[in-house]
């Protein structure tokens, strides 16, 4: 009986010892996994630097596209505010200062006045100036418009 009780006490002691050893090993393993997770290999560092470089390039490209002017949009604007009896023979667009120069002709002063009224009502136009007003030999009215556009028209 002493032998059985001794074996029982010894097995309980070994069980506590093994449980403690397993808990310590698991704790040490968690610490090592955290250390390994925090360290990066040279390949990972190089790949991360390359990806960050691409990210900076993409952001720069997005900024460039955001500020890029689209002067082709001016054609739709001119088409929208052009009076049926007015035709433009010359058009110059200055993207830097949002200026549009139009040289044109019309059949009479009434249609020119209507064209000016249409331009004044256009919300995308900040200002207009009429210059070089003349009547040609054929009886048509020649003129020039210097139009200041809002920056949102071209960008």
Image: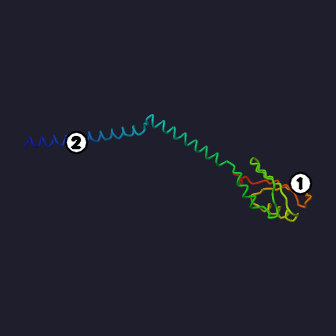
**Which residue is located at x 79 percent, y 64 percent?**
84
Relative to residue 59, is residue 152 depicted above or below?
below
SS category of the residue bearing label 1: strand
- In the rendered image, residue 96, in percent from the top left (x then y), is placed at 75, 47
Q: Earlier in the sequence, mark 1 or mark 2?
A: 2
- Residue farthest to the top? 42
**Which residue is located at x 82 percent, y 56 percent?**
128
**Which residue is located at x 63 percent, y 46 percent?**
63
Q: Nearer the viewer, residue 116 or 20?
A: 116
- In the rendered image, residue 34, in percent from the top left (x then y), is placed at 39, 40
The scheme the figure's colours follow is: rainbow
What is the quadrant of residue 23 in the picture?
top left
- Whole-angstrom CA distance, mark 1 to mark 2, is 106 Å
Residue 132 placement, left or right of 151: right
Q: Which disc is residue 16 wearing?
A: 2
Relative to residue 59, is residue 46 depicted above or below?
above
- Residue farthest to the right? 137
């Amino acid at each position: 009986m002493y032998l059985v009780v001794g074996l029982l006490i010894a097995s309980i002691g070994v069980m506590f010892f093994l449980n403690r050893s397993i808990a310590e090993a698991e704790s040490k393993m968690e610490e090592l996994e955290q250390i390994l997770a925090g360290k990066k290999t040279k390949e990972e560092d190089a790949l991360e630097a390359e990806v960050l470089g691409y990210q900076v390039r993409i952001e720069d490209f997005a900024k460039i596209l955001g500020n890029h002017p689209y002067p082709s949009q001016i054609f739709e604007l001119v088409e929208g505010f052009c009076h049926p009896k007015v035709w433009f023979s010359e058009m110059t667009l200055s993207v830097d200062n949002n200026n549009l120069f139009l040289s044109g002709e019309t059949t009479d002063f009434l249609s020119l006045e209507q064209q000016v009224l249409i331009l004044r009502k256009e919300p995308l136009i900040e200002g207009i100036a009429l210059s070089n007003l003349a009547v040609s030999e054929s009886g048509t009215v020649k003129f020039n418009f210097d139009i200041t556009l809002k920056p949102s028209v071209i960008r």
